[in-house]
Structure formats: structure tokens, C-alpha cells
Image (cartoon, helix red, strand yellow):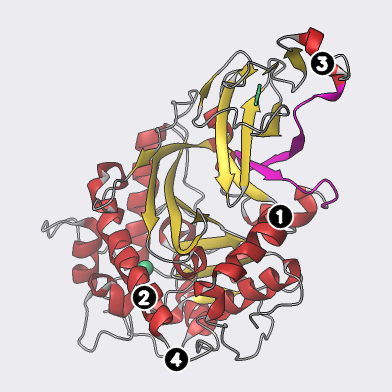
């Protein structure tokens, strides 16, 4: 019988790890949290167009941000249009195989060079035909006789900095910014056992949400809402014993939610076969039998290891129970949410959508481990239309309806924030500490904040 945990947060989670059959690694045993006080967040940050303008000018123009996956740039000439706020970039694979990013704006009179991803040999402006090669050098200047005052070598496409980590391409428009390595801090060490570069995209789904990008993001920085928004999960998810980690002097945070443990919000007894039945989606009694000396979590983890090995032809036998099944979600400022672990190989990204502070673009990726010896092509972007939900993307499987529960909620949050007479939200001390941390980091980028 699984005990309903009575100790909250990291203490409760570490207790779960204490009884795991396959012990968790040190990175999950570590728990760090700076005390960020008890303050809330100014309502204006979510609803005010002026605040969003400040973000465009001071955040997105200066921060490292995930632009795309390297696998989206598999061949020379592949180009991805990456946009946020006023920023529009062309991220591409050059003939030499390097990755470069250029401002998506013609040097002549400013026309956008491309409006969509694709494959090109050169970048040609549709207005008067100025053309650049994949290294950003001007290679065709129509009516060059009329530009005697111009040095073609000086008309390179303006370039922005590019760096990669974990199979992701990051860009930073600020030439004076510190390196991506410095920005990531200790994050890569946490993914040493989950190399995201050794995965491939099996789903990439985007949807415009009727909420500010921070409202969308913040719904995924806490497990507090699980019992209210996802009541179907409470018998198998230890929401209130989620461990929240906010290490000092880092731009990332983490939460780890144990799976295979009932929530304290469940007021009845949940026995082990019930947990296994709902996790394994089975009615077969043999499948939900727990061998002598094993546990629910060990049975679930064994299933995950076996499934992974079957699907990939690779060995996952050294995976701890926690790594196999728990929800291990990292957040890298400002908008990138990669999960470690294997049961839910998710990545989220949130961006403002145009100039409307009440809309944002949410993207969901699934990154599955690569099959041995091959790299399948990544799934194409599936952009959901208005009226469609994540459940309309079958490639997301059981996650689609869960994500729809979240996205329905965040639209109500935005509407309610607009209606609120209050100036500030109220945040839980521990369960919403990552939201507080996110806003501290945001403040580092903004000028003295008019919306405090
Ligand atoms: S605006 Fe691009 S060639 Fe004229
Ligand atoms: Fe949720």
C-alpha cells in the first residue's frame, strides 16, 4: 500500500527516493533554494502593452534564446525563421556546415527576406533582388551602376551570435553578451545523463494562446495546480511533494514531481494495483502484480527501461527509478522549458505573439531518444488553428488533453488579470518560488521598472 505523503516539498520527495529500488543520482539528491521572500508579481507585467514593449527592447534583444533544433538545419541551405517581438532572424546552415543567424531584413530598404522556413541556395530579397550567399556576403547587386557610392563588401547581412547546446540552436542579438556557456551555468551538468542532442523531435506542436507569454510559461513552473486543473492525475502524481530547486546565481530552476505516488489531495486509500492500472492503462492483474522486494515505482521504471530499449535498440539499464518515471522539468530563462527524464520527454517554449500582451505562442516538443545507428527526420511543425487544441495533435498522445486543461486555464487567468482591481498577485512561498525567481531574472534585463 502506498502511503499518502504528509511531508511537503523536497523533504517528501527525498523520502520517496529513499525507498527507490534503483537509487537516484546525486543531481536529484541535491536540493538548493535561495530564499526569494514572499512577494507577488505586479499585475501590469501581464496586461500592460508598455511593459511588453520594454521586454521587446531590453529582454529579447539581449538574451540567449532557443531558436530551433539543430536537426531542423540538417543540410546546407536549410533556414528557419525565428521571430519574437520585433526581432526576426534567419537561422541557417551554411555550405561549410556551420550555423549562422542573420537579421531578416534587407539592407536595401528593409524588406523581410523570408517569411517561412525552407531550403535556399542564396537569400534573395523579393523587392529589388539584392542577394546574399549563405555566409551573409552580398553576391548580387542589381543595377550596380546606380550604387557607385556603396561598397558591396560593406553590405553584408547583419549577423547575430549563435551557439548550440543539447542539440538546440541558441541566438543572442547582443554582440556584447557573455557566452552561452556562461549563461547556461551548471545546467549542462544536470543533463549529462540526458543528452538532448542524442534525441530527435517526434512532435512539434504550436498554438496561439489567449494569454500573456509569462502567464502561459508560469502555468508550467509549478505543480500546485495539478489537483484542480488535472484531477485525473492525483492518484499517480505526488504534486505537493514536488521538489522546487532555485540554485543561487543561476538562470535556471527545476521542479521534480514523483510519479507513482498518490497526492495528499486524495482523501481515500489508493492501493498499488490502482496506481499501476492507471499508469500502465491495463486491466490485466498479472501486469499489476508487484514482485517481492519491488515497488510500484520500480515496476513502472522497469517498464519504461524495457520500452526504451525495445524502441531504440539501446541500453537503459542504468537508469534510476526516478530518472525513468519522475517529472523532472528544468526552466532556462527566459522561455525555454526542457524536461530531463524519459517518461515525459517534453520541451516547452513561450513567446509573445505580436504586440498584444494578451496573446502568446506556446510550442510543445517531444524529444525521444535516437534509435541506435540512425537519426530519423524531425517531425514537422504542426501549427494548431484557432479552435483546435493539443488533443487535436495525435503525435502528443496522452499529453494533448492534459495540455488543453492547462491552456484553457491560462486564458481565464489573463481575462481575470485584466479584470482585477488588485495591483499584485499572491504567490505561494515554495510551490511558486520559480515564478518569483523568473521575475527576478527578468528585472535584471529591464530598466528601472515602471511596473514594479
Ligand atoms: S528592399 Fe530588398 S532589394 Fe530592395
Ligand atoms: Fe498543468
The stretch of residues the image draws in magenta is 154-177
Write down the residue under mark 1. 63
* Proximity of marks 2 and 1: CB atoms separated by less than 8 Å: no
Write down the residue under mark 4. 421
Q: Nearer the viewer, mark 4 or mark 3?
A: 3
Q: Name the residue at the front extreme.
A: 146
Write down the residue under mark 3. 147
3D distance between C-alphas at marks 2 and 3: 53 Å
For the point 67% across and 69% down, the residue is 442
The quadrant in which residue 120 appears is: top right
- Horizontal side of 413 relative to 106 (left or right) equals left
3D distance between C-alphas at marks 1 and 3: 36 Å
Q: Nearer the viewer, mark 1 or mark 4?
A: 4
Residue 409 picture location, percent across and down: 32, 71
Answer whether residue 416 is visible to the viewer in this image: yes
- Secondary structure beneath label 2: helix
Query: Which comes sooner in the sequence, label 2 or label 1?
Result: 1
Amino acid at each position: 500500500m502506498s502511503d499518502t505523503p504528509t511531508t511537503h516539498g523536497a523533504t517528501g520527495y527525498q523520502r520517496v527516493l529513499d525507498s527507490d529500488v534503483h537509487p537516484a543520482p546525486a543531481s536529484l539528491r541535491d536540493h538548493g533554494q535561495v530564499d526569494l521572500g514572499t512577494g507577488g508579481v505586479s499585475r501590469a507585467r501581464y496586461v500592460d502593452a508598455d511593459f511588453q514593449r520594454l521586454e521587446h527592447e531590453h529582454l529579447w534583444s539581449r538574451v540567449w534564446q532557443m531558436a530551433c533544433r539543430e536537426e531542423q538545419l540538417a543540410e546546407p541551405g536549410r533556414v528557419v525563421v525565428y521571430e519574437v517581438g520585433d526581432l526576426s532572424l534567419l537561422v541557417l546552415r551554411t555550405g561549410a556546415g556551420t550555423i549562422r543567424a542573420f537579421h531578416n531584413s534587407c539592407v536595401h530598404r528593409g524588406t523581410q527576406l523570408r517569411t517561412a522556413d525552407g531550403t535556399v541556395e542564396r537569400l534573395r530579397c523579393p523587392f529589388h533582388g539584392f542577394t546574399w550567399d549563405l555566409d551573409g556576403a552580398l553576391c548580387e547587386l542589381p543595377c550596380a551602376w546606380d550604387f557607385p557610392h556603396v561598397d558591396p563588401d560593406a553590405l553584408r547581412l547583419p549577423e547575430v551570435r549563435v551557439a548550440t547546446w543539447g542539440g538546440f540552436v541558441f541566438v543572442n542579438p547582443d554582440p556584447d553578451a557573455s557566452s552561452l556557456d556562461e549563461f547556461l551555468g551548471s545546467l549542462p551538468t544536470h543533463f549529462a545523463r540526458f543528452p538532448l542532442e542524442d534525441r530527435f523531435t517526434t512532435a512539434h506542436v504550436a498554438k496561439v494562446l489567449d494569454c500573456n507569454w509569462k502567464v502561459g510559461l508560469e502555468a508550467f513552473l509549478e505543480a500546485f495546480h495539478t489537483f484542480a486543473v488535472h484531477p485525473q492525475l492525483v492518484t499517480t502524481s505526488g504534486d505537493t511533494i514536488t521538489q522546487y530547486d532555485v540554485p543561487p546565481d543561476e538562470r535556471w530552476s527545476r521542479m521534480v514531481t514523483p510519479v507513482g505516488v498518490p497526492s495528499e489531495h486524495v482523501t481515500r486509500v489508493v492501493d498499488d494495483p490502482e496506481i499501476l492500472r492507471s499508469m500502465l492503462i491495463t486491466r490485466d492483474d498479472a501486469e499489476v502484480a508487484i514482485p517481492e522486494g519491488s515497488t510500484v515505482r520500480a515496476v513502472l521504471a522497469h517498464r519504461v527501461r524495457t520500452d526504451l530499449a525495445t524502441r531504440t535498440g539501446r541500453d537503459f539499464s542504468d537508469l534510476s527509478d526516478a530518472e525513468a518515471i519522475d517529472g523532472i522539468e528544468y526552466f532556462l530563462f527566459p522561455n525555454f522549458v526542457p524536461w530531463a527524464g524519459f517518461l515525459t520527454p517534453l520541451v516547452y517554449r513561450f513567446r509573445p505573439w505580436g504586440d498584444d500582451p494578451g496573446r502568446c505562442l506556446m510550442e510543445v516538443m517531444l524529444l525521444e531518444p535516437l534509435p541506435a545507428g540512425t537519426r530519423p527526420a524531425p517531425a514537422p511543425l504542426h501549427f494548431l488553428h484557432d479552435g483546435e487544441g493539443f488533443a487535436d495533435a495525435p503525435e502528443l498522445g496522452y499529453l494533448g488533453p492534459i495540455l488543453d486543461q492547462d491552456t484553457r486555464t491560462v486564458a481565464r487567468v489573463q481575462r481575470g488579470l485584466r479584470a482585477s482591481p488588485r495591483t499584485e498577485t499572491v504567490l505561494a512561498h515554495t510551490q511558486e518560488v520559480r515564478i518569483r525567481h523568473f521575475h527576478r531574472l527578468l528585472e535584471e534585463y529591464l530598466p528601472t521598472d515602471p511596473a514594479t
